[in-house]
Image (spheres, coloured by chain):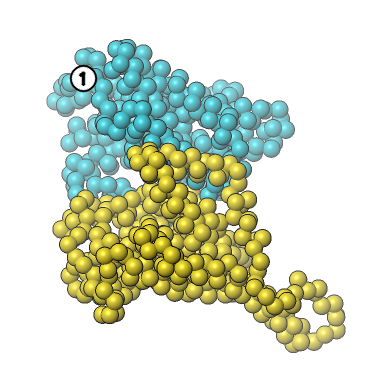
Amino acid sequence: MLTILFDGIAYGMLLFILACGLTVTLGLMNFINLAHGAFAMAGGYVTVVMMNRYGISFYWCLPAAFVVSALIGLVLERTLYQWLYQAPHLDQVLFSIGIVFMAIAATDYFMGGQQQLINLPPELSGRMDVFGVGVGRYRLFTIIVCAALALALQLILSKTRFGSRLRAAVDDRRVAMGLGINVPLVFALTFAFGSGLAGLGGAMGAEILGLDPNFPLKFMIYFLIVVSVGGTSTVSGPFLAALLLGIADVAGKYYVPAIGPFVIYALMIVMLIVRPNGLFSRGGR
Amino acid sequence: MSVLPQETTVSANSSTAAAEARAAKLMKRRSRIRFYEIIVWIAAIAAYFLLPSKMLILTEIAILALFAVSLDLVLGFAGIVSLGHTAFFGLGAYVAGLMAQHYFAEPVTGLIVAGVASGVLGLLTSFLILRGSDLTRLMTTLGIGLMMAEVANQMAWLTGGADGLSGFSPGPILGMFEFDLFGKVGYLYCVGVLFIGTMIMRRIAFSPFGLSLKAIKGNSMRSAMVAVPGRKRIVTAYTIAAVFAGMAGALLTQTTAFVSPDVLAFHRSADVLLVLVIGGTGYLYGGIFGAILFTLVKDWLSVITPQYWMFYIGLLLVILVLIGRDRLSRWVEYLPERLSKKEDR
């Protein structure tokens, strides 16, 4: 029971890291980016290639995954995404579905369609007993890293100059530009950072979530749930939503395997009907 | 457009009459049969005689066209971006398959039952898309689509699970026309259903009802101010679209005598959106033109790169959006509006 809770928390933390970039693009920049999973997949494959082909340590792969995904995100944002910020939502949906399809086919072409496996360093594999609860070491590692990241994000958004610029740009783009904030730059950096986080999440999740070319489609709905249920105004909203989703999903798959996914979708739809703007949305908007 | 009447002393009665006459004229002009419509249907019949070896792909086009036209009613008229339209397509496909397997093998009955079943699902789920923004609708429709796929996958005792539903053969249409090996009867059947379905949706879409849908799409608050019952209209349009999407699914089942879980897959929802984008939204025939182009391109790509055609479909989507999809479908406006007869503007 506690083990399931623990696994659920690890899973939820991972979902948060994967999805929090989307919170910004989707929620704050109002861009429906269904291709977010593709960046996560990129990070995952970077790790797989580096570890399995070149034998580089897992710990070096994580920052590399972040950097590569962030660079891909930056390039795509500057070349393609930025033209569509003002476009109708239908255009954004079609565009990002197109990106997803291309990413899936390209990955299939270069890496093959099979499930990718990575070998974790020995100190991270296996389980240990903490007060009688079986705890996966890797899951503990995931929780620690993700919690640190979540905390850092919250601090960056609320305490740094960049964070306040971003919030200003999101609240009112025109006024922010009028005040001399370089809004396109802020958006581009944020997009890159979000993509990088997704890549990091993909790298860390290769062990827990699995990694194959269909990754972006398989987890698209999870990311969207985190964002739409969590709302977009804070970091803590999506964080709690991701935790809830993670625990519900793991518990659902464990206790009622036949209808597990069904429960998640049903919950999401109910949630959206009751609170169309997210669980923890800002009031009055 | 005619000039607005300037009389100030005119009685309310006659000005209402004049306005009504103007509105009637406008509606008439909107709904008259256009040149390209006649061409489409002639071409559909001609294809039967000219391309006897291509019946299967033509059938596929007709089915996809009906599916896309039904989505256009939701997307092009009511302005709802749906990522789960295939839920209705898939439900129709399964219902038609189960009908043929367990109860009654006559296809038209199966078609109607499938349409009704999808319509009921459409009616039930339409209440979920009334609230919230584009994103909420997107998520809800996507969620419904995924739920349907999950249901079909889990209820293996009924649907055959991942193996799909097979081992049934549809009987002769109306007890008279047996499906033949070359798909000729199947093609005519599908084109017939497509024709009737398109005509019904055309009647709906170009009526004052369709105009009010476009008003809701344009600005839901303003349309509410001029007393358009937005929620009711969207529920109705969504349900009608679901009925025809279900019929398209039923056609697929009946012409292939097989239902695979693929009918509920996400990529179908994306494909049908792409079809509409290629053909253009908001005039119904975009679904048909788009289906023709999409099927031909996909067929051609899957010959060249059997495994990676998805890449090029994705590339096509990205390019289409970046060029601007409106520019693509504008060519229809340059077609002559009618064959002869001077227009009394």
Q: Foreground: B262 or A209? A: B262
* Residue A68, percent from left and from top: 45, 21
Which residue lies at the image location 28% right of the left edge and 66% below the top edge? B254
Q: Amino acid at mark 1?
A: Ser
Q: On what subunit does the disc labeled 1 rest?
A: A
Q: Please state, as top left, top right, bottom left or bottom right, where the N terminus of chain A lies in the image.
A: top left
Q: Is residue B309 left or right of residue B21?
A: left
Q: Foreground: B19 or A46? A: A46
Display colour for chain B: yellow
Display colour for chain A: cyan
User: Is B155 rendered above or below residue A102?
Assistant: below
Which residue lies at the image location 51% right of the left edge and 59% below the top edge? B289
Which residue lies at the image location 30% right of the left edge and 64% below the top edge? B182
User: Is A250 rendered above or below residue A203?
Assistant: below
* Residue B34, percent from left and from top: 60, 70
Q: Is residue A269 visible?
A: no
* Residue B27, percent from left and from top: 64, 75
The residue indicated by pointer 1 is: A125
Q: Foreground: A103 or B13? A: A103
Q: Is residue B244 left or right of residue B102?
A: right
SS assignment at label 1? loop
| Badge 1 density bin: few <14, some 14–19, many ≥20, Cα 10 Å | few
Which residue lies at the image location 59% right of the left edge and 55% below the top edge? B329
* Residue A126, percent from left and from top: 18, 21
Which quarter of the figure has residue B207? bottom right
